[in-house]
Image: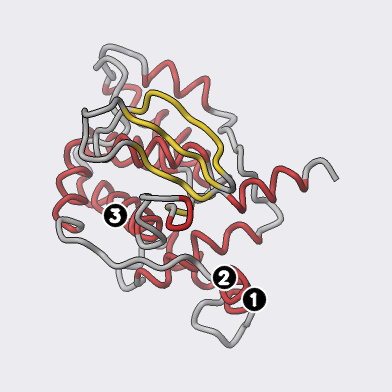
Amino acid sequence: MKKIILLTAILIAAFSKTYAQEISFKAPDYELIKKNIQDKNSNYYYPKLMERMIANDTLLTNEDYRHLYFGYVFNPKYDAYFRSPDEEKLGKYLSSDTIMEKDYDEIIKLSEHSISLFPFDLRQMNYLGYIYHLKGDDVSAKKMSNRFQSILGAILSSGNGEKCETGLHVISVSHEYVFLNMFRLESTSQSLVGNCDYLAFEKGKYKIDGVYFNIEKMLENESGHFK
């Protein structure tokens, strides 16, 4: 297929069904999250939560995923501009007109490696779920789909994107575009407004003119690299 859209039909259908109704939101309290994930007696102790996510524990709640996703910014390995070392190799498959069955296992290996380096690599997570589906392993595809949707659910629960004060909190620029692809939106420009990325849309094309993403933790991470 030509340049596979990041969000496959099965993921779009599942996610749309889950979030068909308006959901409430609240900005993450980063200091409280940091306190909780470092407390070994807390239900949100990070190593245990991460183990459960990797094991595809379906009992993890939205609040669990909020601690996982937003809590990752306190991980020493956090890199706001992470790029998969396998990006070039995976790119040749993504841009191919067709995906050969003989390549499934190699793609799975590369995608899993990328996710092991950055547990919130949504692009590779989505691609991995799609390849599992093509391979006929719908059990693994569903597990990856659930993880993917749950992480996006955490992002969606952080704001409504209508203004910077209620921007959707993201820890990676790539997640902004995953979000747009999810709702089949196309931006025409990007600008920095305070601590937010503002992605503008073509006037009149959608019900909204653009969406704000809060990137305060990304900016902090970036400035930390220069210290």
Q: Which residue is mark 1?
A: 38
User: Where is mark 2, residue-wise?
Assistant: 46
Label 1 close to label 2 by CB (< 8 Å)? yes
Kindly give the residue lying farthest to the top in the view shown: 97
Q: Earlier in the sequence, mark 1 or mark 2?
A: 1
Q: Is residue 61 rendered to the left or right of residue 33? A: left
Q: CA distance from mark 3 to mark 2?
A: 20 Å
Give x and y (percent) for residue 222: 70, 43
Which residue in the protein does label 3 denote? 143
Q: Residue at x 32, y 50 (%)?
A: 144
Residue at the (35%, 37%) spot, across then down: 210
What amino acid is found at the position of numbered circle 2 in the picture? Tyr
Quadrant of image for the N terminus: top left
Q: Is residue 152 above or below residue 121?
A: below
Q: Tell me, for residue 15, which label it has, or none.
A: none
Mark 3 closeness class: few <14, some 14–19, many ≥20 residues within 10 Å: some
Residue at disc 3, secondary structure: helix
The residue closer to the viewer here, 144 or 136, is: 144
Amino acid type at mark 3:
Lys
Q: Look at discs 1 and 3 and give the one toward the viewer.
A: 1
58 to 144, vertically: above or below: below
The residue lying toward the viewer, choosing from 139 and 202, is 202
x%, y% of residue 224? Answer: 77, 48
Number of residues whose C-alpha sits closer than 10 Å to that of mark 1, classed few (under 14), some (14–19) or many (20 or more): some
Disc 1/disc 3 C-alpha distance (Å): 27 Å
Say which of marks 3 and 2 sits in front: 2
Residue 71 lies in quadrant: bottom right
Question: Sequence order check: which comes first, mark 3 or mark 2?
Answer: 2
Residue 9 position, x and y percent, is 17, 37
- Mark 1 or mark 3, which has the lower sequence index? 1
Q: CA distance from mark 1 to mark 2?
A: 7 Å
